[in-house]
Image (cartoon, rainbow, N blue to C red):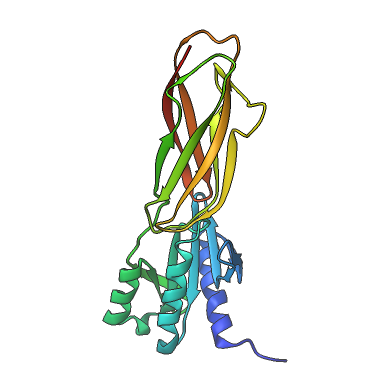
């Protein structure tokens, strides 16, 4: 019978520890949208940890680099490498800390300590262009410009004008749109349409703009227009 490679044994041992701590664990899972295979993904409550394993000094930097990339992908909340305790040197700590990766120190197939810890959140900036005055029955457009001001990639971002009196769905156009991705520093614009209820009472009303997607709490903001 063919023996299991030491690297695979080590990965499974780390996975077993995380399972014993109440995590749901997947080995070799493909992380989207990066289309990259993680050694381990461990989930519990709102956490989704990517863990790369390394058994030799030559593989540690590659593991850290890969983990640093995965921490920027929307499904992942934090990234780790798991390595034997004897391999954790000052340069390893510095490199991992610089790129925001935490280290699991492993002794006899048990995680005995951790080093460092950084989470990256989606950080969006929103700007709007819209008419300040609209009339009953009018259809109009709200331009929403979204800027990714953080490190973490935005993915499958749904942008919508929430339908609330006195605004209704447009007869043409759309009141929501989806951005497949928004990389760090990238800016994109969507055009959303609304229509004013023909029977609306004149006044000043809010329009609620909502942006939501994997890996962050929804952004909800409001702009105001005058209905006459």
Q: Is residue 97 left or right of residue 223?
A: left
Q: Nearer the viewer, residue 164 or 213?
A: 164
Q: Does 96 sit above or below residue 166?
A: below
Depth order, front residue of 105/180: 180
Q: Report x, y in % for residue 171.
A: 67, 26
Q: Is residue 26 above or below residue 228?
A: below
Quadrant of the frame with the N terminus: bottom right
- The quarter of the picture where residue 129 lies is top left
Report whether 41 appears left or right of 226: right
Residue 192, x across and y down, in percent: 55, 35
Q: Residue at x 55, y 70 (%)?
A: 38
Image spot of residue 76 (x, y percent) = 50, 59
Can residue 82 be seen by looking at this rendering?
no
Vertical relation: 68 (above or below) 196? below
Q: Residue at x 42, y 23 (%)?
A: 132
Q: From where the camera sits, is residue 39 visible? A: yes
Q: Nearer the viewer, residue 137 or 205?
A: 137
Residue name at image x 57 percent, y 61 percent = 33
Q: Quadrant of residue 161?
A: top right
> Which residue is at 46% across, 68% downward?
69
The x, y position of residue 124, in whole percent, is: 41, 47
């Amino acid at each position: 019978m063919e023996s299991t490679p030491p690297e695979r044994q080590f990965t499974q041992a780390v996975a077993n520890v995380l399972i014993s701590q109440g995590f749901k664990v997947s080995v070799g899972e493909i992380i989207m949208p990066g289309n990259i295979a993680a050694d381990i993904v461990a989930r519990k409550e709102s956490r989704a940890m990517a863990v790369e394993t390394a058994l030799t000094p030559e593989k540690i930097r590659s593991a850290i680099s890969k983990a640093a990339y995965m921490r920027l992908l929307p499904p992942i909340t934090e990234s780790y490498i798991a390595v034997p305790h004897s391999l954790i040197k000052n340069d390893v700590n510095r490199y991992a800390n610089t790129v925001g990766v935490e280290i699991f120190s492993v002794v006899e197939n048990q995680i005995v300590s951790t080093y460092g810890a950084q989470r990256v959140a989606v950080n969006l900036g929103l700007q709007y262009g819209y008419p300040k005055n609209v009339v009953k029955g009018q259809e109009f457009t709200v331009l929403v410009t979204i800027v990714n001001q953080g490190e973490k990639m935005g993915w499958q971002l749904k942008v919508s004008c929430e339908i609330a009196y006195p605004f209704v769905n447009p007869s043409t156009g759309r009141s929501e749109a989806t951005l497949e991705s928004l990389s760090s520093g990238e800016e994109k614009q969507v055009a959303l349409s609304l229509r004013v209820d023909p029977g609306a009472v004149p006044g000043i009303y809010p329009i609620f703009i909502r942006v939501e997607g994997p890996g962050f709490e929804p952004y909800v903001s409001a702009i105001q227009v005058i209905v006459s």
